[in-house]
Amino acid sequence: MGGAAISSHGLSCAPPAAVPLNPRARRASAAGHRSSAQLLLRSDLPAPAVLCRARSQSSSSSNVNFGRGDDADKLLEDLLKQHGEVVYSSGGSPSPAVEADDDAECLSFAVSLAKVASEIKAADIRVLCVKRLVYWTRFFIILTAFSNAQIDAISSKMRDIGEKQFSKVASGDTKPNSWTLLDFGDVVVHIFLPQQRAFYNLEEFYGNATPMELPFDTQVQ
């Protein structure tokens, strides 16, 4: 299966042309009842940085004279002296090196889960880097199973591997559904029955995601 490989320095995900809306919102009327964990999925961008200012309890806007042009710098200095420091929050973004290490660790976890699906005869297994498209996870695993029993076996084994080998506990569906979701945080697993896989077509919906190479062959439907 073709895709983008990850190097020891991290991976590069192609930036999206546009951030897609979630397919569940578009197809909710046709989908019927879904679990709350799945319905919460959305593809919006992170909140912008927050501008914080420590205000004096005795401060008054009447003492501020607004200027223009060259007076702007002096006005800012006066405001800082009167009201405190301006603090910009970057959301605690890690350094590029730390981010690359986190990506590599998460990809290793995702590939381990994908191997579980392959061993239990799932088809069309794909690992997609979606970190440039959504803020709530780094990787999708999308795969097809052919019965509720197979879905249950795959999800149970994935939960076991996640907890015992990676200390990660999945939220999401605890019983097999036609679209079963396991949310490990940085890795989200979507297990579909064939008809639902074709209907929701997440690969097309997240078409700007980067497919990752897998160390095994997978049956493509």
Image: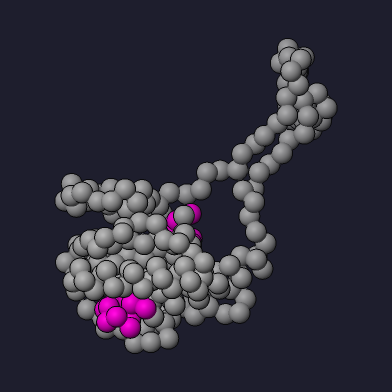
Task: Residue 20: give x, y in percent of width and height.
Answer: 36, 54
Relative to 181, is 131 on the left or the right?
A: right
Residue 115 visible: yes
Q: Quadrant of the N terminus?
A: bottom left
Is residue 131 inside the magenta stretch? yes
Q: Position of residue 48 (x, y in %)?
A: 56, 43
Q: Residue at x 16, y 66 (%)?
A: 195
Where on the picture, by quarter, is residue 180?
bottom left
Q: Is residue 127 left or right of residue 148?
A: right
Please, which residue is most extreme toward the top here?
A: 62
Q: Residue at x 44, y 77 (%)?
A: 112
Q: Is residue 123 magenta?
A: yes
Between residue 41 and residue 184, name the one nearer to us. Answer: 184
Q: Quadrant of residue 114?
A: bottom left
Q: Residue at x 33, y 83 (%)?
A: 119
**Residue 138 visible in this rendered orientation of the protein:** no
Give percent across and percent down for residue 218: 31, 84
- Give the magenta range: 116-135
Q: Nearer the viewer, residue 221 or 75?
A: 221
Which quadrant is home to the C terminus? Answer: bottom left
Q: Residue at x 35, y 56 (%)?
A: 172
